[in-house]
Image (cartoon, grey):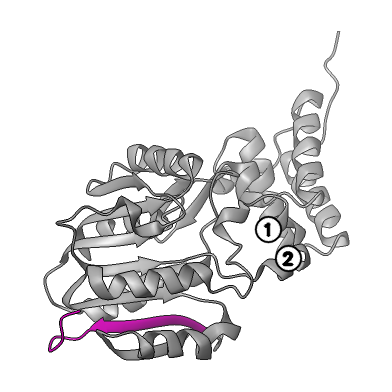
Amino acid sequence: MRRPIGPTRREVVQGVARELSSQGIESSRLEAERLVSTVLDVKPADLLDQGGVQLDPATAGRVAMAVARRLNGEPLQHIEGTAEFRSIELISDTRALIPRPETEELVDHIGNWIGKRAPINRGLDIGTGSGAIALALLDEGLVSHIVGLDVSQEALAQAKENIEMSGIEGLELRLCQSDIWSAMLPQDTFGLVVSNPPYVASMDWRRLDPKVRDYEPRLAIDGGPDGLKVIRQIISGAAIALELGGAIFLEIDSSKGPAVLDLLRSTPGLSEARISPDLSGRSRFASAIKRADLRV
C-alpha cells in the first residue's frame, strides 16, 4: 500500500507563513521557518536545503499543532523551547521571562563602563530569572563571579538548567524572600549590581500583550502600584552592598526615567546618576556609581 504523499517542506513553510501573516504576525516567513524547523528538529538552513522533501501526515499534523499554539498567542520561544541571548542559547518556558533585545543592550552598557579594566570580581544580578544577564556577563569576561537572586524557585531551577546547558561557570544562585536583600551574607559586597526588575504598574497588568500576560511570570513583571516597588528596594540596598567605585545598572520602563533618576540622586552614597536610551531612543537604562568619597 502506498503511503500518502504530503506537501514538501518548502510548501509547508510557505503555507505557514501565509497563515501567520494573515493573523498580523510580523516576520511571518522567519517564524514559519523556525516553527517548521522545530517540529522537524533540523536547522533552518537544512530545512531550506531540503525544501523538496515531503512531510508525512503525522509530521504535518505536528506542524499544524505548533502553528495553532502560535496563533493562540504563545511566544515562539516557548514553542521552540529555547531563546538566544547574546551568544548563549537558553532554555525558555513559563518559569522565567523571555530575554529581550533591550536587555542585551544593558550588557553593552555594563561593558562600556568596565571598558579595558579587569573584570569585576563579584557581581550581583537581582531577579536573575533565566540567568541570561549573569551568564552573559560571565561569558563575555565582564565579571569573574556573580550571585543571581530570585524570589521564584521555578526561575532558579531554570537558571540552574541554563548553567548546565551553557557550561558557563561562576554563577551562584540564591533564593530570596519578599525582601530581596534577605539572602545577603554579612561579608557580601559587590563591584556591580544589575537588574531587569519588575517595573509594570499593577493596574497595567491586564493591558499587557496577551503573549506576555498569559505566558510569562507575573512575579517578574508586576512592579507594584506605581511600578517602582522593587526598584526602590534595589536602589536603597545597592548603596550599601556596592563597593566604593562600584556601579548599579537597571533596565527600566521608558516612562519611569524621571522617577528612577530622582531615586538614584536622592540615595546617599550614589552619584553620577543617569538615564540612557536604548537603540530606539527610549529611556531604558538607569545607572549610578557608589561614591568613592562617601561611605554609607
Q: Which residue is depicted at the point 78% across and 55% down?
A: 17
**Mark linked to residue 127:** none
Q: Amino acid at mark 2?
A: Leu
Total labels drawn:
2
Describe the element under mark 1 as helix, strand or loop: helix
Describe the element under mark 2 as helix, strand or loop: loop
Give how far across and how far down residue 207 sits, in percent.
77, 68
Q: Which residue is mark 2?
A: 208
Of residues 2 and 43, the one nearer the viewer is 43
Tell me: residue 16, above or below residue 290. above
- The CA span between labels 2 and 1 is 7 Å
Magenta region: which residues? 283-296
Of residues 177 and 201, the one nearer the viewer is 177
Q: Which residue is depicted at the point 53% across and 74% down?
A: 228
Decide if residue 107 is on the left or right side of residue 247: right
Q: Which residue is mark 1?
A: 212
- Check the picture and name the quadrant holding the N terminus: top right
Decide if residue 210 is on the left or right side of residue 75: right
Q: Amino acid at mark 1?
A: Val
Q: Please tell me in which quadrant of the rendered image residue 61 appears.
A: top right
Of residues 7 and 116, the one nearer the viewer is 116
Considering every residue shown, the one lying at the far top of the view is 1
Res. 276 visible in picture: no
Give how far across and how far down residue 10 sits, in percent.
73, 46
Tell me: residue 200, above or below residue 86. below
- Check the picture and name the quadrant holding the C terminus: bottom left
What is the crowding at mark 2: few (fewer than 14 residues within 10 Å), some, or many (at least 20)? Answer: few
Q: Which residue is depicted at the point 72% across and 40% down?
A: 9
Give how far across and how far down residue 135 sits, in percent.
33, 54
Discs 2, 1 touching: Cβ within 8 Å: yes
Decide if residue 283 is on the left or right side of residue 132: right
